[in-house]
Amino acid sequence: MYKIAVLPGDGTGPEVVREGLKVLDAVCEKQGIKYEKVDYDLGGERYKKTKEILPQSVLDELRTVDSIFLGAIGHPDVKPGILEKGLLLKLRFSLEQYINLRPVKLYPGVWTPIKDKKPEDIDFVVIRENNEGLYVGEGEFIDKDTPNEVAIQVSRNSRAGVDRCLKYAFEYTQRRNRDKTLTLVGKTNVLTYAFDLWERAFHEMGKDYPDVKRDYAHVDATCMWMIKNPEWFDVLVTDNMFGDIITDLAAMIQGGMGIAAGGNINPEGVSMFEPIGGSAPKYTNQNVINPLAAICAGGMMLDTLGETEAANMIEKAVMDVTANKLKSLSAGKMGYSTTEVGDLVVKALK
């Protein structure tokens, strides 16, 4: 019996979570997997009413669950940064979800803006360090609001933090067993402190994984090759900021935010899974948003819990729907409502 915390969140989050849970219920029934859901109303509406973002009591409860299923965070009536820092980043940091896992896969029938590329050409994974770098929020202003103002933002990278991310990346590359190539994405020619550490740690640890080929690419070159030759990549590992940027680019080449799912992973603790597209408030309650990213996030959650067969069933069902049913992945252009897309995936499971 798994205990799953459900955070529908803001905007279209509750709509896509509803479909994700619909598919999760169907596959778990089929596979004999039992789980209980615990709902939490964290997000913009709660903040507006109570000024609470993530109470300590709730955080303590979340430490006891098996996994977290998140819809979206971001409310038009709440100043940007408040919920993102107070909820998303606090969960990632407090629960030590030090890996952000982003599979990038072009499914059959999905349009990609890259000419002549097919599903077999776009199939790689980005592993982003999720607890350090620029996102630790260290910095200061000097002479703020004067002509001499200076803003300092610190990218903190510890050897322990880098090592645990790299260890996960090497082991993931082994398990994935595709090309067994792990590419470190950095900027060693300019960021000579942070990526000197990353590069040294990468090659030192790589000696323990002789079956994994090591490669390196500057982040700007990575963006170019991701567009021109995405088939070159197997698994990429990088720091927090670069990972944030290149995964959005990667989402576009796999068909857009409507299909992109991500996991915030603590390999020894509680992980959290979400569609990466955000709350999309302009589509709220219209039943037109694409739920496939949330459905895929549910599949990722099952895979991380060890229910690999059930996870594979969800992915195959999604692929069947993209190949044979949907006109587009864009909101309002799918040819089906949000609810109907969830129904299609359930039907494909059966």
Image (cartoon, rainbow, N blue to C red):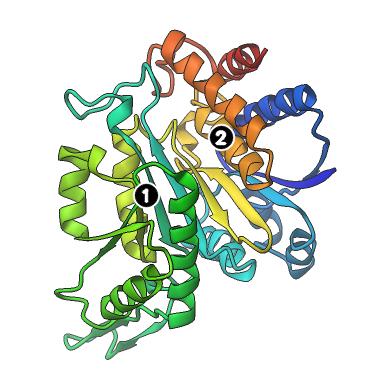
Q: Which residue is mark 1?
A: 180
Q: Which residue is outermost to the front? A: 210
Number of the label disc, if any, that sits on residue 344? none
Residue name at image x 48 percent, y 75 percent: 161
Kindly identify the amino acid type of the residue bearing the numbered disc 2: Ala
Task: Locate residue 233, reporting x and y percent.
Answer: 28, 45
Residue name at image x 27 percent, y 75 percent: 195
What element does badge 1 sit on? loop
- The quarter of the picture where the C terminus appears is top right
What element does badge 2 sit on? helix
**Badge 2 or badge 1: first in the primary sequence:** 1
Q: Which residue is mark 2?
A: 294
Residue name at image x 46 percent, y 52 percent: 174
Q: Is residue 226 above or below residue 110?
A: below
Q: Is residue 9 left or right of residue 133?
A: right
Question: 10 Å neighbourhood of mark 2: few (<14), some, or many (≥20)?
Answer: many
Quadrant in which residue 302 is drawn: top right
